[in-house]
Image (spheres, grey):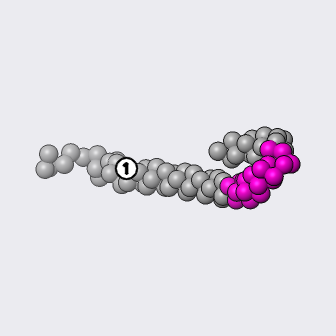
Amino acid sequence: MGKAAHTLATKLAELGTPWGDDEQGTQFGDAYTPHVEKIEKSTAILVQGLASIHTAMTDMADGHIENEALIAAMFRKVVTPDSQTERRDQ
């Protein structure tokens, strides 16, 4: 998303002000330009937020994997010299 936002901002900047210098073009430019800047700033914040969520989700997934391995290890049968003899309750 960050790359797409950057590409859009670059392409729009390359276009310059294609709406002209007449009264209508000036009115459009005056209304349009401040919103573009706000949208670009908002998009940058959104990209940072999504990157942060991605990092947090990756960390959480790693934590679940580690926890699963820990729990699995708790239930593995450990062979000791005493446990090699047949149990009476079997």
Residue at point 70%, 46% (across, down): 5
- The magenta-colored residue range is 19-40
Pick whichever, 10 or 65, lies toward us. Answer: 10
Identity, as a three-letter code, of the amino acid under mark 1? Ala
Q: What is the x, y in percent for residue 12?
A: 77, 43
Which quarter of the picture shows residue 18? top right
Q: Quadrant of the N terminus?
A: top right
Q: Which residue is mark 1?
A: 72
* Residue 33 lies in the magenta stretch: yes
Q: Determine the residue positioned at 41% across, 51% down.
A: 68
Residue 13 location (% of width, % of height): 82, 45
Disc 1 secondary structure class: helix
Q: Is residue 42 visible?
A: yes
Q: Main secondary structure of the magenta part?
A: helix
The answer to whether one can see residue 52 in this image is no
Please state which of residues 63 and 21 is positioned toward the viewer in this rendering: 21
Asked whether 83 falls inside the magenta stretch, the response is no
